[in-house]
Image (tube, coloured by chain):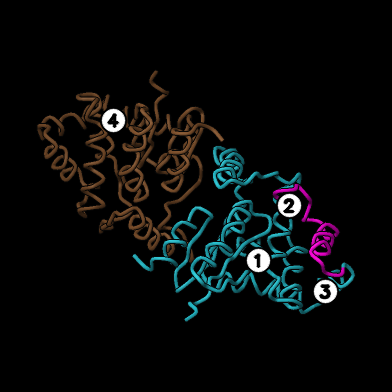
Chain colours: A cyan, B brown
Amino acid sequence: MVGAPVTFWCEFSSPYGYVGAEQIGGIAAQAGRPLVWRPFLLGGVFKVTGARPLIEMAEPKGSYFRRDFLRTAGFYGLSITMPQRFPFAAIAATRAAYWVEATAPERMGEVVLALYRACYRDGRAIGEAATVLDVVAEAGFERAAVEAGIAEAAIKQRAIAAGEEALAAGVFGSPFVTVDGERFWGSDRLDQVRKWLVEGPW
Amino acid sequence: MVGAPVTFWCEFSSPYGYVGAEQIGGIAAQAGRPLVWRPFLLGGVFKVTGARPLIEMAEPKGSYFRRDFLRTAGFYGLSITMPQRFPFAAIAATRAAYWVEATAPERMGEVVLALYRACYRDGRAIGEAATVLDVVAEAGFERAAVEAGIAEAAIKQRAIAAGEEALAAGVFGSPFVTVDGERFWGSDRLDQVRKWLVEGPW
């Protein structure tokens, strides 16, 4: 019996999203659960919830998060290169992810991870559409097809709809995991996600 | 050589503070570090940072935290009974902790933990001064002496000063650990605190 899917919600501009994206595949696989990737634009959610990007918070919070991004990544064995422009608009990256889902759904997670790694591991500016096209092309898709794809009205609408679905699912940050009617916010809740999936409720 | 002290900042009304208070003693002891307990009134800090109690946040956050308090406690093997009045004013509890520090400093941590357990394990209303006096008396202090102590101007001032020290240390939530010039926010950062103390920086 295959269990209910694990949905991983993430915003490409979120460093904690990257930290989570590097782990969620292994966690879902270990539990034998299908994994659904749901990148979304956190800015649209913030407009509704009234929240603000962590790094734009006044002191003492802004400096805390700048440090914690790096330290938390390092805690999980990852090394983060913060992008020069941060936070950035992840519109092209989000659209590209949904274009991949529409084109080759089984490869969506791989492309989401490739975009995250391009940004946070390699320091590439995935806030720019040209970089997004490069990264998706390097994953084996035809660059011109990706470029045309992310300009399609249906793909643009799909990226917007993901944010609406996030709000409807009670998601308000990145990363966020929903599974079995439970919500888990943050890369620091992945230990609880693992326990939930492997041992069941407590 | 004794290492630099670990300072544990906490607000008695914070359930995550309770989750952290149950663990920090063992973590500091394992690392051979002195532990300094610094309960403070988060409300005063929130006035400066503009933050709000988690449970008073609009949906979808309020319901998330009400669930996460219990789930996170359970993850660490604790069972939380949420107080009927929550959040509550922890003025008497904070003053009592500093009266104990002034009177029998080596017993402060034990009394902080006793107050937290009275609240979150046993469901007692430590927002009320009478309950605080009961709990500290049960720990072996003379009830009348505690009652007189928390009315002293110096103790009241000490409780206020703790909030000012928290802000000066860059503390903006509960629990919070400061050590070796690092700041760790949240019960979900205690794994990083443990690694930091045992293995050193990464």
- Please tell me which of labels 2 and 1 falls first in the chain: 1
Where, by quadrant of the figure, is residue B145 drawn?
top left
Distance between mark 4 and mark 1 Cα atoms? 48 Å
Instruction: Specify the segment rendered in magenta.
Output: A119-142
SS label for mark 2 = helix
Q: Is residue A76 left or right of residue A133?
A: left
- Of circles 4 and 1, the one toward us is 1
Where, by quadrant of the figure, is residue A84 drawn?
top right
- Of circles 3 and 1, the one toward us is 3
Distance between mark 4 and mark 2 Cα atoms? 50 Å
Mark 1 — on which chain does it sit? A
> Mark 3, residues whose alpha carbon is within 10 Å: few (<14), some, or many (≥20)?
many
> Which residue is identified by label 1?
A40
Inspect the magenta stretch and tell me whether residue A188 lies in it: no
Which residue appears at 49% of the width and 58% of the height? A190
Distance between mark 3 and mark 1 Cα atoms? 17 Å
User: What amino acid type should be assigned to the residue bearing mark 2?
Assistant: Cys
> Which residue is identified by label 3?
A149
Q: Is residue A67 left or right of residue B74?
A: right
Inspect the magenta stretch and tell me whether residue A122 lies in it: yes
> Which residue is identified by label 4?
B156
Residue A135 horizontal/vertical position (percent): 80, 60
- Please tell me which of labels 3 and 1 falls first in the chain: 1
> Which residue is identified by label 2?
A119
